[in-house]
Image (spheres, rainbow, N blue to C red):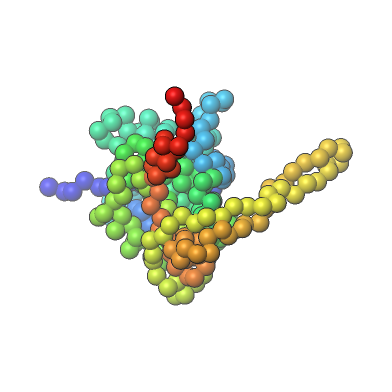
Amino acid sequence: MQERALKILVTNDDGYSSKGINTLERLLVQYGDVLSVAPKDAQSAKSTALTMDVPLRLFKVESKTFENGHTLDKYHLNGTPVDCVKAAIVKFFEDPNLLPDVVVSGINHGSNASAAALYSGTLGAAKEGALYGIPSIGFSLDNIYPNADFSPVERFFHRIFENFLKFPPAEGTFLNVNFPAIPPEEIKGIKFAAQGMGRWTKEFNLYTDPHGYECLWMAGRFINKDNRRENADHLLMEQGYVAITVQKIDSTDYRELERMQHCWQLE
């Protein structure tokens, strides 16, 4: 009896035509049938945002069958990365017992290490997959340019993805994988990491438009606040490592919860 092909749901936040998602689709059809539902336009920094004010429209881009028998069905949606995951599941996986085997998001053009993980649409989609109980993972490369060189990801992708399939993250968790933008031969290895601490300062440049109105343009400079933790993801990347962080849906700080329950006087 022939083994069933893996059902892989793919999305991103850079848009369906980005080089990152095209690279990811090509890598994943080696493992199973790929359904790619991605935003029509770039949706960076949308985190877990939903579209609630306009109707969403799903448009088929292409269908392919490869020599290994696996398929790629590619769509775009006029919504956010989380919209894409939800729409794909509603449209193509009506039976709740027949959900995708995995959700893979990326490959993002730009790092999603440290505080960037909080804003990332790439990781918002992975989190949404985890909410459905589907093993989910997001991939990012520290290069924001449209024609980024994804060879560092291609070099190490199979090692990471095959471990992900064999030992998936626990329910309620998902993986965030970040690659430094250096030649593949210069990458020192792969390490599990903690999410780094940092924030942006001077986040907007102020301008006056031709009509005399003040406007703000996103800019910002990253401030590292994690010099002492050697396993912070962004610091490992600076040292030439691929960094993998395990993130979770439940963001409760249980230690602080217990402390505050003891010190607050609520009765």
Q: Quadrant of the C terminus?
A: top left
Q: Is residue 203 visible?
A: yes
Q: Quadrant of residue 191?
A: bottom left
Identify whether 151 is placed above or below 216: below
Which residue is at the front of the view, 229 or 71?
229
Q: Position of residue 97 (x, y in %)?
A: 25, 33
Left or right of residue 99, residue 188 in this image: right
Q: Position of residue 95 (x, y in %)?
A: 28, 30
Which residue is at the front of the view, 34 or 121?
121
Q: Is residue 9 visible?
A: no
Residue found at x 66% / y 56%: 221
Identify whether 164 is placed above or below 213: below
Residue found at x 53% / y 26%: 52
Task: Tell me how many marks there are.
Answer: 0
Which residue is at the front of the view, 182 or 15?
182
Q: Position of residue 62 (x, y in %)?
A: 44, 43
Residue found at x 78% / y 46%: 206
Q: Position of residue 87 (x, y in %)?
A: 42, 32
Residue found at x 52% / y 67%: 238
Q: Residue furthest bottom?
A: 185
Left or right of residue 242, residue 172 in this image: left
Left or right of residue 245, residue 17 in this image: right
